[in-house]
Image (spheres, rainbow, N blue to C red):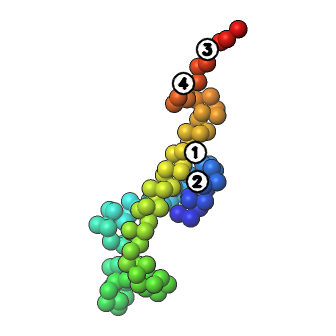
Amino acid sequence: MVYLLYAGFRRKTDRRAALAAAVVGGETLVFVGNGFRCPLTPLAQRLGDTHGSVTDIYLPRWFAHNLPAIHVPLIVLAVALHRRNFRENRFKRGGYPTVSTHQPRTR
């Protein structure tokens, strides 16, 4: 996610950014497919955690609890940045401009 944002702000939409987007997208699909619950929760509960949480090991409780609410705006921002980059690159390569650039000739 960090690389996606970095690359988006630096206007670097390349294969590495596409790979990072695929990883973030895959993680998002797994999370959504598991009912908006971390797929590791059942494993943590089987191993003895009463809450089924593994994020409390390395993240503050408030941050771990709000991860989806924090990540969704970041994903939207990354998509917007790379969409902008695609549009700019398409225009530079001779794609169709969104605004007419036709200037009448004057003699």
| Secondary element type, mark 2 | helix
Q: Is residue 73 in view?
A: yes
The residue that mark 1 highlights is: 85
Rendered residue at 51%/30% (across/down): 98
The residue that mark 2 highlights is: 8
Q: Residue furthest front?
A: 107
Q: Are the residues tagged 4 and 2 within 8 Å (C-beta)?
A: no
The residue that mark 3 highlights is: 104
Type of amino acid at the residue the image marks with label 1 = Asn
Lower position in the chain sequence, tag 4 or tag 2 = 2
Q: Residue 83 placed where, x, y %?
A: 51, 45
CA–CA distance in space, label 4 to label 2: 26 Å
10 Å neighbourhood of mark 3: few (<14), some, or many (≥20)?
Answer: few
Between 105 and 45, the residue placed more toward the observer is 105
Q: Are the residues tagged 1 and 2 within 8 Å (C-beta)?
A: yes
Looking at the image, is mark 3 or mark 1 nearer the viewer? 3
Between 59 and 24, the residue placed more toward the observer is 59
Q: Is residue 10 above or below residue 52?
A: above
